[in-house]
Amino acid sequence: MKVVWQLLAVAAVAFVGQLAVSAVDGNPWLTLVFGALTAVLAVVAYRWVVGKTEHRPVTELGGPGAGLTVGRGALIGLTLFAAVIANIALLGDYEVRGWGTLPGALGLVGFMAAAAVTEELLFRGVLFRFVEKWTGTWIALVATGVLFGLTHLFNEHATLWGALAIAIEAGGLLTGAYIATRKLWLPIGVHFGWNFAAAGIFSTEVSGNGTPQGLLDAVTSGPSLITGGDFGPEGSLYSVLFCVLATSAFLWLAHRRGRLVPRRRAERTGDVTTLSR
């Protein structure tokens, strides 16, 4: 029931926030405001429900320097996506035709902040954390990554390959960022930076969802395995490659810090908080 209550609390904020953002569609300034408000309220709801159901300090959202960590994560996500676009452009499959719109990009700041925060709280904060208690790090990483990828099958231009790519890229990268730090701030930042770079800067499709134009007026063309096709660059082999490399770095760091939870220890103690220190 702890899992159920925590999922319901965050999902309720995400649902209401999505309705609010949809209601002001076309107004980037209100999208920015409602998106940012959704992100803040989701964090408040998570802190409250976890504290009530688990009777412990919410350490995964604690610690000084949260803003700096989110910013560092955003820079990592932006850099990774920029590397993907640079390689696609080198093959002549991404072309910038001019400038897009600044207000549209600002609206996407709020939209992507809401998505990054609510999804990280649900998938890494609740699901991964509890599954890891029962199964250990590796099984939890694979299981929640696959689930995260499958949820993207409901997007407008979804493909099975796109969902698999998301499972490998985001499921691994974002979970790896959480495991390495045992805080949610870094994966939230990486998630936001990647998504905002995709839509807000480079004006590409994000996970098969059509998004408003960002800073650049650009088009992609060419083989789907290179560009991602209608699903967007997240379906590109370049995205898989760069995210796997970054995931490996995070997991190596987690191993060095002693933050990987073996299955047998997880089953015996059921206490990931103790094991992660």
Image: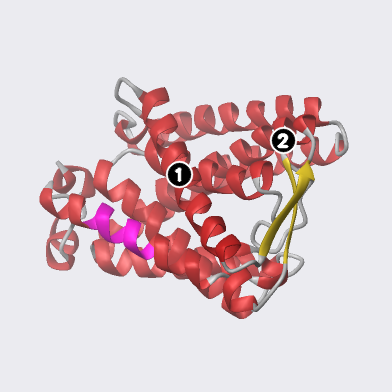
Of 238 and 88, which appears nearest the observer?
Answer: 88
Of 87 and 169, which appears nearest the observer?
Answer: 87
Q: Which residue is mark 1?
A: 190
Q: Looking at the picture, which amino acid does disc 2 mark?
A: Ala
Determine whether the residue tagged by mark 2 lies in a helix, strand or loop.
Answer: helix
If you read the primary sequence from the N terminus, does the residue marked by circle 1 or circle 2 appear first?
Answer: 2
Crowdedness of circle 2 by 10 Å Cα count: few (<14), some, many (20+)?
many
Q: Which residues are magenta?
A: 244-251
Contact, mark 1 vs mark 2 (Cβ under 8 Å): no
Q: Which residue is mark 2?
A: 105
The relative height of residue 4 versus residue 70 in the rendered view (above or below) is below
Q: Position of residue 127 (x, y in %)?
A: 42, 55
Q: For the point 60% across and 36% down, which residue is it?
A: 113
Q: Is residue 238 magenta?
A: no
Question: Colour scheme used in the picture?
Answer: secondary structure
Q: Position of residue 76 (x, y in %)?
A: 41, 43
Determine whether the residue tagged by mark 1 lies in a helix, strand or loop.
Answer: helix
Judged by its main secondary structure, the magenta piece is helix
Q: For the point 59% across and 45% down, which residue is it?
A: 197
Most distant residue in the top direction: 64
Q: For the point 32% across and 54% down, which residue is it?
A: 176
Q: Is residue 245 magenta?
A: yes
